[in-house]
Image (tube, grey):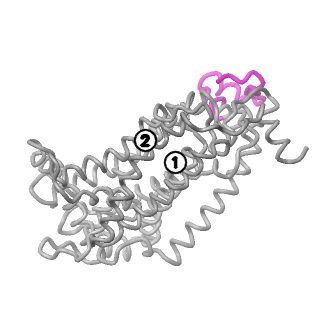
Amino acid sequence: MSFPWAKHYEPKNPVMQWVDSRLPLPRFVYNAVGAGYPVPRNLNYWWNFGVLAGVALVCQLITGIVLAMHFHSSAASAFDSVNVGIMRDVNAGWFLRFAHANGASMFFVVIYIHMFRGLYYGSYKAPREMVWLLGVVIFLLLMATAFMGYVLPWGQMSFWGAQVITGFFSAIPVVGDWVRVWLLGGYAPDDAALNRFFSLHYLLPFVIAGAVILHIWALHIPGSSNPTGVEVKGEQDTVPFHPYYTAKDGLGVVVFLILFSVLIFFAPDYLGHPDNYIPANPLSTPAHIVPEWYFWPFYAILRAFTADFILPAKLWGVLAMFGSILLLFFLPWLDKSPVRSGSYRPMYKVAFWVLVVDVLVLGYCGGSPAEPLYVILSQIAAAYYFAHFLIIVPIISHLETPKPLPGSITEAVLTKTGA
């Protein structure tokens, strides 16, 4: 979107004029995050989480690059290189390891909130479909990267997590076993699998960074969405990104880093699993194999299928797990309501909060043992998850009577403040 009232970069310093005329990087930064990028004046703190995701990605890249310098991608020495070499022999190695491990959890916290904000405020609707689609691509890449990173410490949960998750590919008819052997480089997780996962775990964050650049680029074309869902009508509806939102995002970053520091220094193993401090042993299966917490909702969907029906239950589980994410790609076309924001959609708002509870139930079941009660809860919650997107949202978009929308962003702001 073109903003005629946006300020244009005009360097005053001769050196900056010379640089800008040959490499317009200062102009690019100014137009992307400076006064040259007008944004809606009513953005709330839920819009901070995009910037926080970028901060989390930078933390992961920096700590990951340093950790890779000291990691041994061999089944015989990976465990010791992490728990002895990095933790005890590398200067501040314990900090780097805990920052990287807990940084992944903080990254997923931020991403999940960012995605649910998009769901509530309709940020996936036209003209921002490409922004949403690239966001889902980033989410898929992040999940793949996190899974491969969880394997690298080569503890009991790392080994058996790789064994179980890659084992589900064998459910694919005809080519399943071949795919699993191709992924692992053998018939069980070993040196070949560890080397492959390490290489991809190192490479994919840079692919994610490239996808993030495309995500931001796509966002700058239509401009940011806002809590009302009403498009910008004029200069009175916007403020420059700097200094207004750089200050607001700065506060969010400070709070994020405080919480991140508390986790690193006071509870570094709280989100991990104690069995991963036991070296990988192919002859000793843990009593309860469970992935990291951010995979729990999808793991619950995977385990919800227990009976064969035309296809094996194992294959249904794999299809449902991947389908639960791929379904998000079609959301812009499943929700046909012309109103974006859930604040003006009474029926959709109720359905949204039911979905939030449903995902939390799936997460709880995914982290629990595969006992009958949790399996039944997983089946009910998984059924509702798919029904929400495929049945409830399309029906609501046709039947719902939205609340009256404000005439403009400025009108909504002034009404809220009583002006």
| The N terminus sits in image quarter | top right
Asked if the stretch drawn in magenta spans residue 6, the answer is: yes
Where, by quadrant of the figure, is residue 307 drawn?
A: bottom left
Where residue 365 sits in the image (x, y, percent)? 36, 66
Disc sitting over residue 115 in the figure: 1
State the separation of the CA atoms marked 2 and 1: 20 Å
Q: Is residue 364 above or below residue 383?
A: below
| The C terminus sits in image quarter | top right
Left or right of 143: which side holds 14? right
Q: Is residue 12 above or below residue 78?
A: above
Disc sitting over residue 136 in the figure: none
Where residue 60 sits in the image (x, y, percent)? 46, 56
Mark 2 neighbour class, 10 Å CA radius: few under 14, some 14 to 19, many 20 or more: few
Residue contact at pointers 2 and 1, CB within 8 angstroms? no
Left or right of 380: which side holds 116? right
Q: Amino acid at mark 2?
A: Ile
Q: Amino acid at mark 1?
A: Met
Left or right of 110: which side holds 386? left
Q: Is residue 135 something one can see in this rendering? A: yes
Q: Is residue 141 something one can see in this rendering? A: no
Residue annotated with mark 2: 391
Mark positioned earlier in the residue sequence (2 or 1): 1
Q: Which residue: 26% across, 46% down?
A: 319
Magenta region, residue range: 1-29
Mark 1 neighbour class, 10 Å CA radius: few under 14, some 14 to 19, many 20 or more: some
